[in-house]
Amino acid sequence: MNEEYGRRIERFREILKEGNAVFFGGAGVSTESGIPDFRSTDGLYAQEYDYPPETMVSHTFFTLKTAEFFRFYKNKMLFPNAEPNACHLALSQLEKEGNLSAVLTQNIDGLHQKAGSKKVFELHGSVWRNYCLKCKKPHTMYEVIAKNGVPTCDCGGVIKPDVVLYEEPLDNAVWAGALGAVRKANTLIVGGTSLVVYPAANLIREFNGEHIVVINRTPTSADELAEVLFSEDIGKVFTDVMQGW
């Protein structure tokens, strides 16, 4: 590794050693596990869908065009075989060793828990939890995948993923827990998020600790606040930090 990058890695490691860090992450954390950002579109996207991604994962779209919602949801947002990557695994280790107090994630893939993290605030819910809108019976992701078209419960009700769609509020208890974790933290690590999705992006305004570390491939609104800034891949950064641990 080059000298300047090495200095940033060493400083990040020193900050982590102080303990009481909180990690706030987004889609960029899971792309190295093969889960694309659902907002990203390729040349085939317009041939397959008539609406932009943000529209298709809105409450209005789910309500009015339920079949089209599930066609997009099953094709673009469900990755049951995805495995945790170096970032997920490092965060789990840091928590076990007492250096990381919580993970706040905008992702809905459950990979932090799969890696072993215990204190995870899923701001936008999880694809692994689903429930019937009529009788509230819980259903697994695999049940949703197995059902053709719109998944329905035995009672006839539509099964809805326990994810926060556009136009829907965040869960109050999850939001309160995330706010508390950020306000108590000494270090805030912002990783794999461009900080453009609200209200989650407002969390950084609640941080009153000493250190902010930003790890993102593209510029973010928090860059000017960062004590240490990385534009390298997040998996590489955590791999290099943990090698000297």
Image: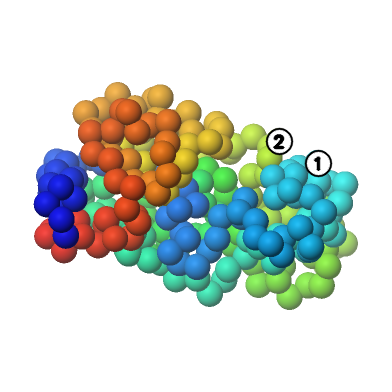
Q: Which mark is residue 171?
A: none
Q: Which mark is residue 60?
A: 1
Viewer-closest of 231 and 120: 231
The amino acid at mark 2 is Glu
Image location of residue 137, percent across then percent down: 72, 59
Which of disc 1 and disc 2 is earlier in sequence? 1
The amino acid at mark 1 is Thr
Image location of residue 133, percent across then percent down: 78, 51
Image location of residue 172, percent across then percent down: 56, 34
Q: Is residue 235 left or right of residue 127?
A: left
Q: Residue at x 41, y 39 (%)?
A: 219
Viewer-closest of 239 and 98: 239
Location of residue 12 by image quarter? top left
Q: Residue at x 46, y 59 (%)?
A: 30
**Above or below, comparing residue 179 to residue 59 in the picture:** above
Q: Residue at x 53, y 74 (%)?
A: 81
Position of the N terminus by quadrant: bottom left
Mark 2 highlights which residue? 167
How many numbered discs?
2
